[in-house]
Image (spheres, rainbow, N blue to C red):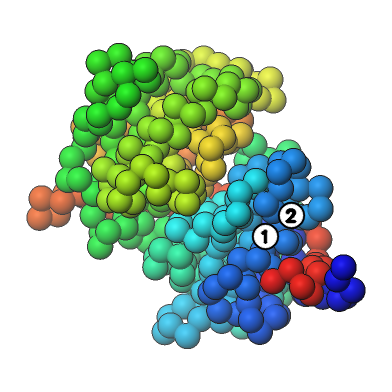
Amino acid sequence: MSGLPQLRIPATYMRGGTSKGVFFRLEDLPESCRVPGPARDRLFQRVIGSPDPYAGHIDGMGGATSSTSKCVIVSPSTRPGYDVDYLYGQVAIDTDFVDWSGNCGNLSTAAGAFAIHAGHVDPARAVDGVCTVRIWQANIGRTIIAHVPVADGRVRETGDFELDGVTFPAAEIVLEFLDPAENDGAMFPTGNMVDELDVPEAIVPGGKLRATLIAAGIPTVFVAAADIGYAGTELRDAINGDAEALARFETLRAIGAVRMGLIGSIDEAARRQHTPKIAFVAPPSDYVASNGRIVRAGEIDLLVRALSMGRLHHAMMGTASVAIAAAAAVPGTLVHRAAGGGERRAVRFGHPSGTLRVGAEAKLVDGRWTVARAIMSRSARILMEGWVRAPADSF
């Protein structure tokens, strides 16, 4: 029986967009955890409370959902022109791994605010108005610019900006995702706006399914809701309470991941749950959001539902929102078709908690579609700060 004491590690618990996670300064981590490897993974798992066979995270800071099982490391950037490096770990809930394969768009909002809180931004730049924080997203090697409201040298966290999926209003933070496409700027890994996937006939009669495979914001597999028997108005319980439906979505996600070249075989998908995401889209229609508000078809351009870490997301992932906006701007994609076609520089979509508007301008350059930036508004605030404790022998 271990008698080692718990370690006290400086940490900040933050909400960013519709997610929340435990934030660390790199220099505050135990030395063995300042570099990638098993020690860092084990520490983050212990902080969150994973792997948890009870799927409750009772003995950790996690909330037993993909939106609340997250850790972040922020450090001063050594890259010219950047303020901080931001590294994100998605901690699996009931299985033994931490996924570093992608970004969290929601916590990107908090990363900008945390950079100021942590003292990684010159205080002279955070006096009054808006402080622009240039972030290097280390997971995927992309630039994020956070426009963070400040007053008297501090982040202004309270305000009247409302974000569907977040209970209380807060101060608005505008995020810019520069050149969000991965694969050296190629948004469509296969080169196609729509691919035909070979899938089990038990999932789709005929064994063929149309999909838009895009790597912008985060690799995402988009399918048409009607093609898989859905309306696009579903809320979490309709999907998450159906084990067979979740298994079908995971199979489709894995097939899409192989076609995108993210994994070599379907068996590898179990070790890469964070990316790609899978989402289904449909033309606008009225529906009742999870808070009881009626969202009218006239308020939105299309419907989108997305799964994260094997469950339907309660709102929408920030990075998936970038993928939605990018795909909606490119003629011929399933997302563009669901939105009614036409030229688009912004899209407002309906998700389980309400609506969200994201801007993206796509251009065809030398026969390849590119997006220079995607823009959205979120909010963030500190929930708790101090020290998180972890048993000394847990990593």
Secondary element at tag 2? loop
Q: Quadrant of residue 34?
A: bottom right
Label 1: which secondary element: helix
Instruction: For the residues labelled 1 and 2, say whether their Cβ atoms are less than 8 Å apart.
Output: yes
Q: How many marks?
A: 2
Q: Residue at x 47, y 46 (%)?
A: 270
Q: Nearer the viewer, residue 147 or 86?
A: 86
The residue depicted at 72 percent of the width and 51 percent of the height is 62
Residue found 25% across the figure and 31% down from its top: 197
Can residue 201 be seen here? The reply is: yes
> Circle 1 sits on which residue?
45
Question: In which quadrant will I find the N terminus?
Answer: bottom right
Determine crowd level at label 1: few under 14, some 14-19, many 20+ residues with C-alpha closer than 10 A.
many
Residues at marks 1 and 2, CA–CA distance in whole angstroms: 6 Å
Give the percent coordinates (x, y) of residue 182: 32, 57
Label 2 CA crowd tier, 10 Å (few <14, some 14–19, many 20+):
many
- Mark 1 residue type: Gln
Residue where numbered disc 2 is placed: 49
Question: In the displayed structure, does residue 79 sit left or right of residue 64?
Answer: left
Q: Is residue 58 left or right of residue 259?
A: right
Residue 384's label in the rendered image is none
x%, y% of residue 384?
81, 61
